[in-house]
Image (cartoon, rainbow, N blue to C red):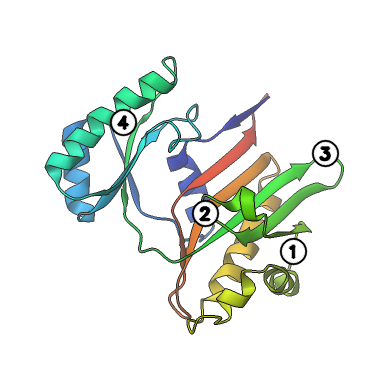
Amino acid sequence: MSRYLNELDANRLLSGYGIPMAKSFLCKDEEDAAKNAAELGYPVVMKILSSEILHKTDAGCVFIGVKNEEELRDAYKRILENARAYKADANIDGILVQEMAEKGLEMIIGMKLDPQFGPVIMAGSGGIYVEVYKDVTLRLLPIGRPDAEKMLKEVKIHKVISGLRGIVYDDEAIIDVLLKVSKLVMENPDIEEIDINPLFVYEKGRGAKGVDALIKKKDEK
């Protein structure tokens, strides 16, 4: 049997390996949400936190650009209502209030456990159209820096990263995330799947930041 971590636990695991993720707070009620949003600074992103509602956007459980406390309280109620309508029996851990990360070039970094070959890492164009463009490249794990560099050069989005429209993006930040995901997977053999999408990549020298993540693990026996 396998199970998905909730998003907060996934973010914490990734952050523990130095992978930059958007700052998030778990909130159990509206007052808690208002307090944490004020600490982060508006606008914020709000999401349902449940390992049983993986497609949060489809469920109407993601609100982006919440600008003030009034909008926050309204969004809090609507997220819970939408979650119950989507899956009435879902176990809900709370609501995430998350910093609204600056948009960048959208990439995906992922990993799946192949039954024949073992763990395979993926990198490529991310965002909501990842399954349409299918601009990805794969490697067996573990990988080293030369592998990560070659992976970047194999995807079409590399032309954009290297300055197609006059902006050069931070390829070093992408390579760093790939190497850290490799390390995480090799040190945690119970992980079956990782999906960081989108990973916002910024201009050269400004790094990258993951804003959404899924991690699937084998259940402990």
Q: Earlier in the sequence, mark 4 or mark 1?
A: 4
Which of pointers 3 and 1 indicates the residue nearer the eye? 3
Question: In the image, 74: left or right of 24?
Answer: left
Q: Are marks 4 and 2 in contact (CB under 8 Å)?
A: no
Q: Give how far across and how far down residue 213 sits, in percent.
A: 51, 47
- Residue kind at label 1, given as amino acid type: Ile
The dot on residue 87 is: none
* Residue, disc 2: 127
Q: Give how far across and how far down residue 169 sits, in percent.
A: 51, 77
Q: Give how far across and how far down residue 114 sits, in percent.
A: 79, 43
**Is disc 4 placed on a helix, strand or loop?**
helix
Q: Quadrant of the N terminus?
A: top right
Q: Would you call the spot at circle 3 few (<14 residues within 10 Å), some (14-19), or many (20 or more)?
A: few
Which of pointers 3 and 4 indicates the residue nearer the eye? 4
Count the labels in the image. 4
- Residue kind at label 4, given as amino acid type: Ile
Which residue of the protein is positioned furthest toward the right in this rendering? 116
Q: Would you call the spot at circle 2 few (<14 residues within 10 Å), some (14-19), or many (20 or more)?
A: some
Q: In the image, what residue occupies the spot 38% across and 19% down? A: 85
Cα separation, mark 3 vs mark 4, equals 37 Å
The dot on residue 143 is: 1
Q: Would you call the spot at circle 4 few (<14 residues within 10 Å), some (14-19), or many (20 or more)?
A: many
Q: Quadrant of residue 58?
A: top left
* Residue, disc 3: 115
**Is disc 2 placed on a helix, strand or loop?**
loop
- Quick check: 91 above or below 19? above
- Quick check: 173 above or below 27? below
Q: Quadrant of residue 121?
A: bottom right
* Residue, disc 4: 79
Q: Earlier in the sequence, mark 4 or mark 2?
A: 4
Which of pointers 4 and 1 indicates the residue nearer the eye? 4
